[in-house]
Image (spheres, helix red, strand yellow):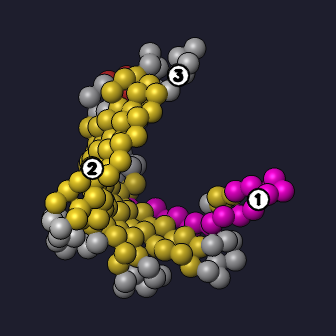
Amino acid sequence: MKDYIDDTNYVKVEAEYRVIQNLKFGPKHNVLEQQIDTYKDHTKDDFLWAQEIENYKFDFYGNIIDRSEMTWLDLTRSTPMTYKVIHNDYDNLLARRKGNATHTFASIYSTNTVLDLTTLIERQEIDNSAFDSRGNVADQTIDKYVVEGGVEYLSSREAIKNLDIDA
């Protein structure tokens, strides 16, 4: 998979190159384990990071409820960078059918062995509070929290309103 950005001359320039491997599937063909190796470009000369993703729980529609992502600084996966735990709630049936969660909770830790305020780097709470008639997100709030001195602080709040998506 390749990601591109436009340079100043409006020419596509390769931004990164990913090698994605789906390693394990569940009985409903959901990906349970996945590895992603990210490089600067398709030559694979400059390694950026590796990820191991595990999807633990799915709903009836195949939406991911619980997931973890371990990010490594090296291809041998010996130097961990971050560990992310994600939980999605799907309270709106129409949005759920489309794969849109009503609430997402994501916590990023410096390790996968101790998950508390001593290792928490950042936490996000994403609230999709309104949906259009097709299940698209109309209103979204993203709260980001950081830890300083063992205390969590709200560091930013982003409010997004999608207009005319139901037109």
Residue 7: image tag = 1
User: How many neighbours does mark 1 have within 10 angstroms: few (below 14), some (14-19), or many (20 or more)?
Assistant: few
The secondary structure type at the circle numbered 2 is strand
Identify the mark nearer the N-term, 1 or 3: 1
Q: Position of residue 1 (x, y in %)?
A: 62, 60
Q: Nearer the viewer, mark 2 or mark 1?
A: 2
Q: Position of residue 132 (x, y in %)?
A: 44, 19
The secondary structure type at the circle numbered 1 is loop
Q: Which region of the structure is painted magenta?
A: 5-24
Query: Was residue 20 drawn as part of the magenta stretch in this picture?
Result: yes
Residue indicated by mark 2: 154
Task: Name the amino acid, label 3.
Answer: Leu
Which residue is more in the foreground, 57 or 135? 135
Q: Residue at x 56, y 18 (%)?
A: 164
Task: Name the amino acid, label 2.
Answer: Leu
Query: Was residue 123 drawn as part of the magenta stretch in this picture?
Result: no
Majority SS type along the magenta span: strand
Asked whether, in this view, residue 1 is left or right of residue 22, the answer is: right
Asked if residue 141 can be seen in this view, the reply is yes
Residue indicated by mark 3: 163
Q: Residue at x 79, y 57 (%)?
A: 8
